[in-house]
Amino acid sequence: MKPTRLLWLFLLLQYPVAAQLQADSALAIIQKAIQRRAIYEKELSRYQCDIYINGNIRLRDYPTHFLGRPVYFPGDTMQFYSAETEAVRYYDGPGKSKVQVLSSTVNGEGSAYGFSYPQLFSFYQPVVKVGDNLNLRGFLSPLAAEAPGYYHYRLDSVFTEKGYRLYRIHVQPRKQYEPVFSGYIDLLEGSWRIYRAHLQLVKKQQMQILDTLNIEQEYKEQEGTWVPARLKLKPTVELLGFDTHGSFTHLFRYHLQPTFPPGIFNNVILTFDTAAKRKSLPYFDTARALIIQSDNMVEYRRADSLGGRDAQNYYLDSMDRIRNRPSLYNVLVTGETFSRARKKRYIQVPGVYDMVNYNTIEGVVVNFAPETRKYWNNGRYLHLLTNLRYGFSNHHFNAHIAGVYRFYRSLSAFRFSGGQRVYQFNNAQPITPRVNTINTLLYRSNFMKLYQAQFAELGYDYDPAKDFAIKGNVAFQHRTPLVNTAFGSIGHPKGKDFTPNYPIELTDTPMAAHNALSATLTLRWQPGSRYIQLPDRKVNAGSDYPTFELSYTQGIDKLLSSDVNYGKWNLSATQTLDLAMKGRFSYKLFGGGFLNKSKVQLPDYQHFSGNDGLFNSNYLGTLLMASFYQFSTTASIYGGASVEYHLNGWLSNKVPLLRKLNWFFVVGGNSLVLEGGSNYADVFFSIENIFKLVRIDFVQSFRSRSFNRSGIKLNIPLVTGKSEP
């Protein structure tokens, strides 16, 4: 054999040995980094961090037409989104954190998958959450304690940069369809800290929305401590012929011995300066911390010049004329929104698809319910719903108005409504008109039971953003029964006919006309509530503790000829727990009863959401295999529990077909115990995220006084439709 061939054979035999040595070396180094991860994660225990963000999204390609309309982008940059933000974060240990957005200039709509706001993560965190809704579980860091079971490591090179000796470790997923990264991490010799990370996510890593996301994070030494100095996020998306790519750079400047402003730490975790979106380009010229690409500067100057014209009515009116052009698809399906931007007034009109339905009481019914929203600069807000309804079979015309007026920069609000309308006997309106239309026409199942009422209601919500809220309302209804007048259907199941228009589970006669006056007081308490302060209002951002709610309703007899006299209470506790890589767990515990039931009309019973049909949209607290009024009660005491566990891709990523389709498992159950031993329970196994929208449930119920039943439920938003306005 020739010497050259012997040399090649020797090298070929040595390659597996060398590769194994590289893997062993890399794993030994990574183990050292993993051992120190928790220390480095908590090392920055007190600081102030100035944050500067600059980003854009561009098109690489796009269709000439979309939904029948021509697509055109002015200029040659093909840039349709740009954002520049300045913020500061104050941190003084767990539970003491606040981010203030000081200034923001945005050219485009939305938050660009959340990348235009501060992304405060590091790969020292065992589970990394980046962006908005890219993966509800988060992504496992290559330095997490369990990471060696999910990653292959390889030592690529050892080199020196700026006087530091670095080890470049290549990381690769052991298995496809796990929420993990690929790429490389540069570690400092000796301390085994992260110096630089270049990692990537793709759809196979269970990432939603985006096709790829490249993440570049760099650290630097400051006052003897290593801190994140730069973060770059580069998303790409191809959807419906649009090919986009973006770049968002975050720069960080740390103050490690800060003096915090007095009272900076409270229950507000994120604030937006009242002028956050009004800063002009000269302001950013002084704050800018990197050189912006030339075409990006053009976009910012264009956005700034437009911002300077915002006060000019002709410009805002011209933009309104463009936005307010109706399209056939919106008119028929999604509805239209008409705006008067300079007056901050918006009118939303429903699509024909939501307006026209069918039931056995009114026949074909048209429900026209436009909504008007008006904003003021001082944070006040008015929301009005006008509802006009006509049934072509019973020839009844109903009209009512409902409104909410929110006070200056507050969560407190005044509510009012009045007119004439139809109600379901369960006033929570659990059956959507669309689902009832399908059940009625195809299966001759008229589950929706209605009565008509002339009504008036006043309410006040007091919410000081201090963990608790108090809500009170007074309601009057003059109730009259309705009867079936339409009996047509497309499907004709053998031996099946429509049922009368009253809950046959509760009575065998129609409800008599009567008046009902009631008052309700509700107390809500959520310990540790956190809030986001927007320029004009506060928003509840949740808590690590359950939400407790206690309500009491008193039926008032004789006043205004009211013919009700009862008192009922309800206490509930709800919470959603983020289990990181293991998914999300929600529960609801509830109990209540009637303290007085001298005169209780059918609509005033304690109703529990049931579902006798195929389609479902509510889960937590819904008795999935019970009829809609089967367990309605006036019992002195009742109680129950509901749980729902969204695995968000955990376990389903082990099933070949499901993991490729990104379908997720859900498990849960509901239970109810009534006074007198009438009990119900169900358990379900579900698959969700089917085509991003659909969920299918397999349900088994257990009853104390009836047959156990099993069945299938479907949640298809376009089919289930919206609740009654």
Image (cartoon, rainbow, N blue to C red):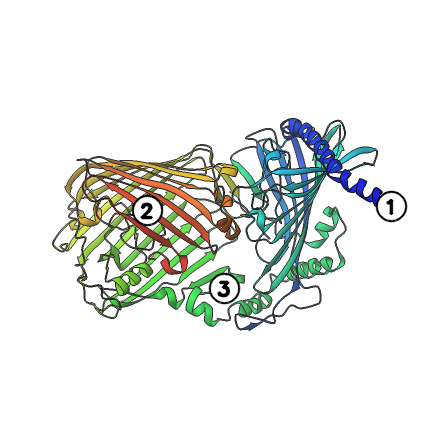
Marks 2/3: CA distance?
45 Å
**Residue hosting label 1:** 2
Disc assigned to residue 699: 2
Asked which secondary structure carries label 1, the reply is loop
Disc assigned to residue 185: none
**Badge 2 or badge 1: first in the primary sequence:** 1
Q: Is residue 405 visible?
A: yes
Q: Is residue 723 left or right of residue 298?
A: left
Would you say the residues marked 2 and 3 are in contact, meaning their CB atoms lie under 8 Å apart?
Answer: no
Q: Nearer the viewer, mark 2 or mark 1?
A: 1
Residue 53 versus residue 334 in the image, above or below: above
- Residue occupying image coordinates x 60% and y 30%: 145
Marks 2/1: CA distance?
72 Å
Q: Is residue 43 visible?
A: no
Amino acid beneath label 3? Ser
Amino acid beneath label 2? Val
**Residue hosting label 3:** 339
Would you say the residues marked 3 and 1 are in contact, meaning their CB atoms lie under 8 Å apart?
Answer: no
User: Would you call the spot at circle 3 few (<14 residues within 10 Å), some (14-19), or many (20 or more)?
Assistant: many
Amino acid beneath label 1? Lys
Residue 414 versus residue 396 in the image, above or below: above
